[in-house]
Image (cartoon, rainbow, N blue to C red):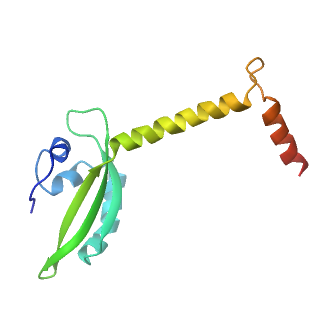
Amino acid sequence: VFLNANQRYLEVFPEKNLTAPVDQLNEAQRAQRRELFSRFRRGEPIQYAFSTTPKGSKEPVYLNELAECVDWEGDDPIYLSIFTDVTEIKKQNELLEKKNKELSYLAYTDPVTQGMNRARFGMVAEKAIL
């Protein structure tokens, strides 16, 4: 049963039901969700990350789901799921990785020859000797 969600969730999953997130997952993400199913059925807490592309959008949205069993109805667990949009964090981490690669290139590359600079040559030579 779907109770409520914030505006961002409704933008990503406008159908307002619990199957909407699963319907928008790719096959690898569905396989991950199937692996978690037995844990869901046992009422265990679940936390996992996934991405989806909302209908009408070209940009993926990255989400973390935290699900906690809050009650039981017969043999069926009742979960409270919290979806956190981590898209901006993911983008910032990707940008950070790109900039770190650029810095590494600049730190160890000679600007004239585009080969190893003195610092990088010293590191490689020391490693080869040891």
Of all residues shown, which one is farthest toward the bottom? 74
Q: Point out the image quarter for the N terminus.
A: bottom left
Q: Residue at x 80, y 34 (%)?
A: 119
Residue 24: percent from left, percent from top: 24, 48
Choose top left, top right, bottom left or bottom right for residue 110. Answer: top right
- Counting every numbered tag in the picture gives 0
Residue 77 percent location from the top left of the image = 18, 75
Q: Is residue 67 above or below residue 49?
A: below
Farthest-out residue, top: 112
Position of residue 113 relative to residue 65, above or below, is above
Q: Would residue 80 appear left or right of 47 to someone viewing this image?
A: left
Q: Is residue 58 left or right of residue 15?
A: right
**Image quarter for residue 44?**
bottom left
Q: Residue at x 74, y 22 (%)?
A: 114
Residue shown at the point (17%, 41%) measured from the top left: 11
Q: Residue 78: where, in percent of width, then height? A: 16, 72
Give the left or right position of residue 123, taking residue 111 as reference. right
Quadrant of res 82: bottom left
Q: Is residue 99 above or below residue 81?
A: above
Q: Is residue 102 left or right of residue 111?
A: left
Q: Image point 43% across, 38% down: which residue?
A: 92
